[in-house]
Each structure stands twice: as structure tokens, then as C-alpha cells.
Image: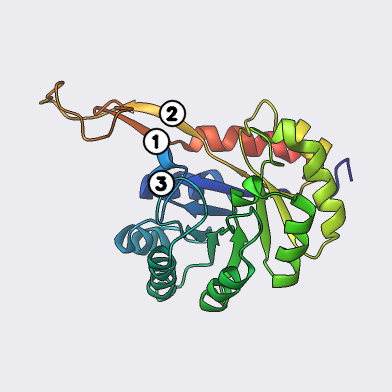
Amino acid sequence: MTGSSNTAIISEICVDSIEGVRAAVAAGATRVELCSALLEGGLTPSFGMTKQATAVAGPVGVHVMIRPRGGDFLYSDDEFIAMKDDIAMLSNLGVDGFVFGLLTSDGDIDVRRVAELMTLSRPAKVTFHRAFDMAKDPFVSLDALIDLGVDRLLTSGQAPGVLEGAPLIRDLIDRAAGRMVIMPGGDISARNVTRIIRETGAREIHFASFESQASPMRHRNPSVFMGGTLRPPEYDRTVTTEDGISKVLSATRIHG
């Protein structure tokens, strides 16, 4: 499946702040994936952050990440209970969707647990996230997700970025045949988005638009770090920008 159509591209923006939600709204995005801890690849945001995000999102849909920790996608019983409790609590805020992914130790989709989380999530939409990119067999995994009734799959095509994974993404879209949305995500930018759309035939895309911004703190202690061994700068902030989102969206309109 290649080429463009008359259907507008649907855009999902990965954000980790209320400012990011506001930037997505201002840029005209379709929805946001709300996370915390993007250095970990995105974790479950707090109740307070999610509540405020839904309050300012307006017409932009809010899909919430459910991921209790970084690392692999094989969760303990305690972690799974936490995921269920987070969905139950955040459902009360009227979010539009939940985003999660669970694998077995053998690299298969954890069908039983995904089904349980889906039941708790409804009537909100469900996206299976890039845990899929760590799965053993992409086509067996895709079929399992379709059988479960998952609404959307976020994937880089089991590659470091979508450009490298484009051939597999195209095959997944063809195999899904409209039964589930396949949404590319991973290193999408204004420079490559038109090529990605052309090569995959995707009608939805997932991306982030961050830039570094200096903290407004005047008093600073340069000797103390709140993080671990990576030690990200304490007085730099990574923010989502309306301009960055708009540049990607403008590039997609060629195919809209």
C-alpha cells in the first residue's frame, strides 16, 4: 500500500506536560499521548496531570500511557495490579483512550492480560504501544491484537526508526486490511514524514516535537543532581513546541 489519498492524516503527539497539550491544541493536532518520564520511554502520568490535560485539551483527544516502569514489558503481578488500578482511576476523568503493551517471557503478546486491561478501558479506545517492536513474530502478534479487538497499533516496524521499519509497517497495514489502525511512530520529523507516508501508506502518525529550554530558576546549585547516573541537566527543560508540531503537520498536508 503506497501513495496518498484524499483522507487527511491523523496526528498523535507524544507529550509529557500540560504545556505540551496546549501546544498540540494550538498546532491543530488530532490527539495527544500523555506520558511522564520520557527518558524512560514514557510512563503513566499522574492523576492530577491527566485531569488538567483533559481540562485544557478541548477538541484534541487525550490518550493516556499505562506503563508502571521503564525497561521490558514483562510485568509482575504487583505491576499488573497497579496498571489495572491506574486505568480504573483515570477512566473517571473521561479520557479518550489508553495506551499499553504487555508481552510474555517468550516474546508473545500477553493475550490474557491485554484482554483484561481492555475490558477495564472500555468504552475508551485502546492502543497497543511499541512493546510490539520487541515481540518475537510481528505477524503472529498482529493477528493476536486484531483478534483481541485492539483499536490501534503503534510501531516503528521493529526497527530503530520508522524509515528503517517502513517495509514491515506497509506489510502490517496490508495484513490488517482495515481491521486495526497501524500507526507509525519513532523518529518522525518534518524532513521525513512525507516519505514515511508515501512508503507505508499510513493514515495516522505518532511523533514528538521537543526542544531544550533553559529553566527560569535564578538560584542554581550545580553540584546536585536529582536523576541517576545519566544525570540530565537539572536546569534544562525539554518542552513540546507548537512550531515543531506545525512543521510536521504542514508536511503531511501534501497527502491530506
Quarter assignment of residue 186: top right
Name the residue located 46 percent from the left edge and 45 percent from the top edge.
71
Extreme residue in the top direction: 222
Instruction: Measuring from the top left, give residue 2's x and y in whole percent.
Output: 88, 41
Q: Image height check: is 234 above or below 180? A: above
Instruction: Measuring from the top left, give residue 39's x and y in whole percent.
Output: 41, 37
First reached walking from the N terminus: tag 2 or tag 3: 3
Mark 2–mark 3 CB contact (< 8 Å): no
**Residue 239 badge:** 1
Amino acid type at image mark 3: Asp
Instruction: Measuring from the top left, give residue 40's x and y in whole percent.
Output: 42, 41
The residues bearing labels 2 and 1 have C-alpha atoms spaced at a distance of 6 Å
Q: Is residue 221 left or right of residue 90?
A: left
The residues bearing labels 1 and 3 have C-alpha atoms spaced at a distance of 8 Å
Q: Residues within 10 Å of mark 1 (few under 14, many from 20)?
A: some
Name the residue tied to disc 2.
211
Amino acid type at image mark 1: Val
Name the residue tied to disc 3.
16
First reached walking from the N terminus: tag 2 or tag 1: 2
Mark 2–mark 1 CB contact (< 8 Å): yes
First reached walking from the N terminus: tag 1 or tag 3: 3
